[in-house]
Image (spheres, rainbow, N blue to C red):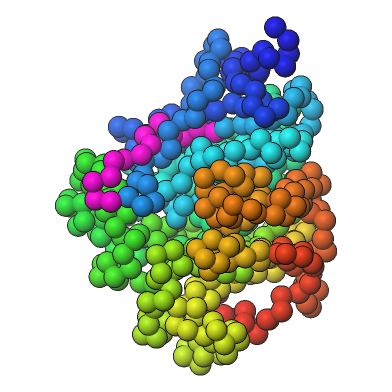
Amino acid sequence: MTKSTAAPQVTLPHGGQLRGLWDQGVRVFRGMHYAQAPRGALRFAAPVPASPWSGVRDATTFAPMAPQLARTARAEAPMLGGEDCLAVNVWAPPAEPGAHLPVMVWVHGGGFFRGAASEPLYDGAALARRGVVLVSVEYRLGIDGFLHFEGEEQAAPANRGLLDLLMALQWVRDHVHAWGGDVSRTTVFGQSAGAGALACLLGMPASRGLFQRTILQSPSVACQSLQEAAAARCAVAVLAGVEPTLAALGAAPQAAVLHAVHRLASEPALRQQYGLGGRNFFPLRPVVDGQVLTAPPLQALAQQWADQPPDLQVLVGSNSQEMRLYHVPGGAIDRVTETQVHAFAQDVGLDASAVEALRMMLPPAQQTPGELLCALQSDFYYRVPALRIATLASQWARSAHGYEFAWPSPQWWGRLGAAHGVELPFVFGNLHTPTGHELAGPMPPVALAEALQQHWVAFAQGGDPGWAPYAGAQPPVQHFGASPYCAPHQQPARFALWNGIL
């Protein structure tokens, strides 16, 4: 049996071995547990490291995704995934231990209540073929990972999903050498809630030294206050038909709890009814509890980086029409009213004059209530936070680079545009997966995918993605569209509307 056909194996530091498989020219190892299954007494506990073993274990099958429902789930939909989800997956080029390959650790998004590292969209083979060790992480979602139980911190610490990510990064630090990875060149990257989780980690002292670079794609940094977290817990409990206590929610049928979270996520009026305003688009978020998270991410970064500048390189950006992902499919964008626009603005602290100023900055065809709400929410949830992080990184980190993804997807009769997540199939080179096709259409520009992968890998290798740093009075950003170029944002006044709010 030749080396090219024999199943690849690695030996971990404790002596246990793993057997993976070859796929698309790279070594693939799936479903390697970094923590014990969070079931029973461990369900809401801080993660406990996985136990070492001797002998050879199979690593060809993904661990289950965290318990969740499908995005389009109906009332009778079954649960997906399972409890034994705390695992990592590795894609690595042929290499020996000590090869000193850069490492990229992926954290998926999904609103903190859905998503999976096993999604074909996130297959890491294309990036691994460019010479990196690609690691993807599963972490607890939904009530298991992010519902806050105030007063129960001994049994259920806050932000368990973030604690999972910290443990996964510790596992990478201690084990990635076995695949030829260089732990001193580790880049963490994520999108949406994944990028938001990483932004939280950046403000947590416990994360220092676990990575040297970070790529934040459309970071969703909104966190809940203790009051908002309590409202979310009560809402989930009422909809699940139980008391809002740790014991009752832990004993509730998991399907009932999942459906409660799903309903809250999909019905804005229901969130409003239970006291969850428009500031948080989804019902579960990291919570500023004072221990795991001492402040919201932007505030934590400003405070901690000023006190102790991080040895960190940052690449951060967003898509130009983020919220079209949520408002275009199904036609919601055409049903938005002026009342809804101003209710959202009021909820996030933006006055009516600023709303009208933004309307006037939009092309005439995009001054409808639906288009205006899309623009407001795109800026509030993703675009302005990305710029704020870029600015902080330019002041305190080793380097900062910014980008904007503006390629307009032709999906939904040309209306989807540069929506949330459209860059993902380009970054991973998985344009023709089902989700890649759904986001980018049947004939996406392959050259754009090549460019994004090249830039992301160059950043992971040496901290320079290939365009000018985000610095100076008019900091440049790399614009990815039909014809990529590097220049300052064209509407600084649009972002200035959020000064004092974000």
**Residue 305 in view (yes/no):** no
Which residue is at 67% across, 29% downward? 24
Residue 152 is left or right of residue 310, and the answer is left
Which residue is at 65% across, 54% downward? 444
| Screen quadrant of the N terminus | top right
350 relative to 77, above or below: below
**Residue 21 in view (yes/no):** yes
Residue 461 in the image: state x and y as whole percent. Answer: 79, 44
17 relative to 444, above or below: above
- In depth, the one of 46 and 329 nearer the eye is 329
Q: Residue furthest bottom?
A: 353
Residue 107 in the image: state x and y as whole percent. Answer: 56, 46
Magenta region includes residue 234 = no
Q: Main secondary structure of the magenta part?
A: loop
395 relative to 88, above or below: below
Residue 374 in the image: state x and y as whole percent. Answer: 49, 74
| Screen quadrant of the C terminus | bottom right
Residue 185 is left or right of residue 437, and the answer is right
- In depth, the one of 174 and 447 nearer the eye is 447
Which residue is at 60% across, 72% downward? 384
167 relative to 179, above or below: below
How many numbered marks have been drawn onto this rendered protein structure? Answer: 0
Which contiguous range is marked in magenta? Answer: 74-88
Q: Quadrant of residue 348?
A: bottom left
Q: Quadrant of residue 474?
A: bottom right
